[in-house]
Amino acid sequence: MLVSYNWIKEYLGDVAPTATAVVALLGAHAFEIESVVEKAGDTIFDVDVLPNRSSDCLCQRGIAREVATLTGLPLVHDPLTIAPALVTTDVISVTIEDEAACPRFTASLIEGIVVKESPPWLQDRLAALGQRSINNIVDATNYVMYAIGQPLHAYDAEKFPQVDGKWQFGVRRATAGEVVSLIAESGKTDDRDVVLKGTELLIVDNTSNTPIGLAGVKGGRFAGVSSATTKIIVEAAHFDPVLTRQTARGLGIVIDASKRFENEPSRELPLIAQSQINKLIIDIAGGESKGMIDIFLAKKLPPTVMVRQDRVNALLGLSLTKNEMTDLLLRAGITVVENKNVFACTGPFERTDLLIEADFIEEIGRMYGYDKVLAVVPEAVPLKEINERHYYSEKIRYSLINLGFSEVITSSFIKKDQIELFNALANDKRYVRSSLIENLAETLNKNSSFIDLLGMQAVRVFEIGTVFNKLATGIEERVMVGIGVRQAAHGYTQKDDQALAVIAEQLSDILNTKITLTPKQGLVEFDLTALLTTLPMPTTYEPVPVAAEIVYQAFSVFPAISRDVAMWVGGDVEVSVVSTVLEAAAGPLRVRTTHLDTFEKDGRISLAFRLVFQANDRTMTDDELTPVMVAVYDAVKKAGFEAR
Amino acid sequence: MQSGHQHPLTKMIAEINSIFSEIGFVFADGPEAETEVYNFDRLNVPKNHPARDMQDTFWFKSSDVSEPTVLRTHTSPVQARYMEVNEPPIRVIVPGKVFRNEATDATHEAQFHQLEGLYVDKGVHMGHLKGTIEHFFSQFFSGEVEVRFRPSFFPFVEPGVEVDMMLKGSKSKLADKWIEVMGAGMVHPEVLKGSGIDPEIYSGFAFGMGIDRLAVMKYGINDVRDLYTGDLRFVNQF
């Protein structure tokens, strides 16, 4: 949420910390600051308000209050402490059918206003938060929402039918198939007709039962304020957070108002908002306040919670004194009544998040500073159990690695299989896999073109991973071990299955149990979950091999090209000497040299090498390699070898 | 025969287990296809709570399952499963695959690995959390590590913190700067209660971090998606 430093300074007064200090304080004790931007003489912070504080801190006053809590200096101007002073009117009526969904509804009448441009200060305030100015009335409702977190809505009273001398509001659930016309969302030009499911809460014109707004989510087209409007009704209400959220998410309308309603702002706010909006509108649009109706069916104030002093220190790992705790709680606006080492704590009304002892302990901890929590490593205790699956996975893993296999982890998602996800991410990831084979087949195909590049004799891979099968009783998960071999770059040969048969014997020896594998197309998998039931329970983990320091290099995604070079050399030439000669001549695009073979004939030694070339930024061409290979052969000749 | 190469994730999981098992943390695991109850409700994340927005979830079709089931969005459900059948003192780690239904890029993949840690006993406090994390990172990165907490929110802990670490005086690129590494906190009393543990007697800490992110830190991997492509140009570097 964007926060204007100039705006919160209005509440903090001259003792406001600098913008830099605000960032440091909030960052260490309250919220992460995503960005800080200097803009038109102001500093704008993007504050990542935590979900539990979205009830009181999705507004400028909330952030100012948080800063005041952290500095210990009270707000010089707190809009939430201003006593509302509006008389009651009987020209507006409100009928609420669902008390739980709408425990409070207020509406006030202001007459004689002039709709026009907002004054520059108001336009600036909204612009600071990236909001476009519309007119003084709409801007005023937005201003109060951004200031204290209570959304409001203004109606043109003359377009709102008055029956029996009353403007009659109703709040009721929608009926299935009912349609409500909503004002265009910001950034969109067209109004929108929405067909409702019947669970949504509506504000209606009770005289005709016409929906005029989707409660908590979006105002309707009904009785919209225009430049000709002179008489308005302003609504400020409280709607059930869960219901608001369901409606907003269900319709894909997530706007500033719904975001606030769904986080349960205080039920005390609508009245305070009315007091402020009336004052503000009269200031900037003229007119006169004609009173208000306040239907408050269910009050909900923060609970009083017992907070044990010893529990505070026990959970935080601190040794705070009683006075230190009290001081911190009071700074947060919490009422504290002490009795025998227990505090009876009540949060200020806007803190709807302070519900249990741990919530208050967190307040103390974060305000005091987690930096003062000393690190204590728990004393080592003997291990209670060995994870059999991990133990045997490791055993199989290291065995296969020793046998030349590299480990892969492939996607659990697959194009087609038994179990389809309800909400897949992509068309080729619609199912979860029931086998490792398909992914490993693809792994063999993909890697067979890297045999030269990686200097492998064959592609040998394995994966130990979970698969999902559909049973009558639901989904069954198993851990499988999948193994694949591809010895010829062009594809499967029978030799691959033979190689896997040998692996089965080797694994049988290592695990001391008969493992039967039936390889097909150079691929095979076996069920580790089932195998575990037959293996003895391990009593201790084997030591983890000491890993060498690895610095990863991003690899080139472009194809590699190979060239073979063979030559006769004198009897006593080392392979490494020849490699050095070749590499010096082959230049920087050579990425690998593989010694292919050595043989002796008629007293002469033949050596053959494969040079692999690859660029980081392009696909190399054969033409490009021609001069390189000329240089390589020249070097061979110069070194006294005879190319063959 | 040339030796094969180990995938960096399993290499790290083995190291993680080795560090934690030395101080008595058991390697626990649980299903990847997890019920809604364990993935959310038992972790104090009720239906329609804004906290569910923090995690985009893959759901199974109701015709395939007997109760609402998801691909687990975190390893935290194993906390509840383990606490249900074990008495404190409890020390567990849960390294495992998790899933999020979100667009992928070089730092996000729809599947990734997480490491969960849980310690429940009499008198467990935030100092133990800090100490355990510091101990782990200093072993894992072979150097002196400092850890700091910043306030955060996760429904299954209270207080909740974001954990930053700093590797001190090393030659590594990571050295001498704060790096955000995980979320953590003291286990929420409702979570303890829900698993049959009395929060009046016991307290505990829990933490969760991305192992893929650890791979980025430890090895300098530039695209986490490479971990799951089966590409040996990647794996054979390890």
Image (spheres, rainbow, N blue to C red):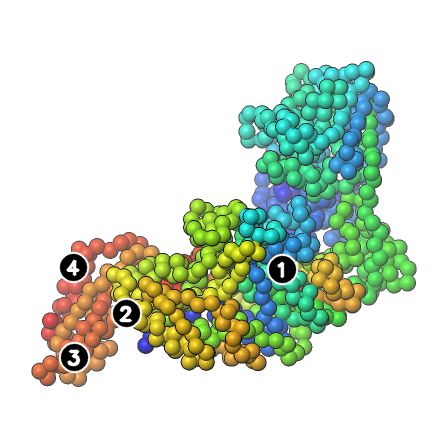
The residue shown at (55%, 68%) is B167
In this rendering, position of residue A642 left or right of residue B207:
left
Report, in whole angstroms, how far the alpha carbon at label 3 lies from the one at label 1. 62 Å
Q: Residue at x 82, y 20 (%)?
A: A91
User: In terms of image quadrants, where is residue B18?
Assistant: bottom right
Cα–Cα span, label 2 and label 3: 25 Å
Name the subunit of mark 2: A
**Label ID, residue A599:** 3
**Circle 4 marks a residue in which chain?**
A
Labelled disc at residue B77: 1
Looking at the picture, tell me which residue is in the foreground, B158 or A297. Answer: A297
Residue A552 horizontal/vertical position (percent): 41, 65
Say if mark 4 contacts mark 3, CB within 8 Å.
no
Secondary structure of residue under mark 1: helix
- Is A628 situated left or right of B33 in this image? left
Nearest to the observer: residue A380 or residue A10 = A380
User: Dot 2 lies on which element?
Assistant: helix
Judged by depth in the image, the label closer to the viewer, 2 or 3, is 2
Please name the residue that numbered disc 4 is placed on. A626
Nearer mark to the viewer, of 3 and 1: 1
The tag on residue A495 is 2
Q: Which of marks 2 and 3 is nearer the N terminus?
A: 2
Of all chains, the one bearing label 3 is A
In this view, the residue farthest toward the front is A472
**Where is residue A263 shown, x and y percent of the image?**
70, 43
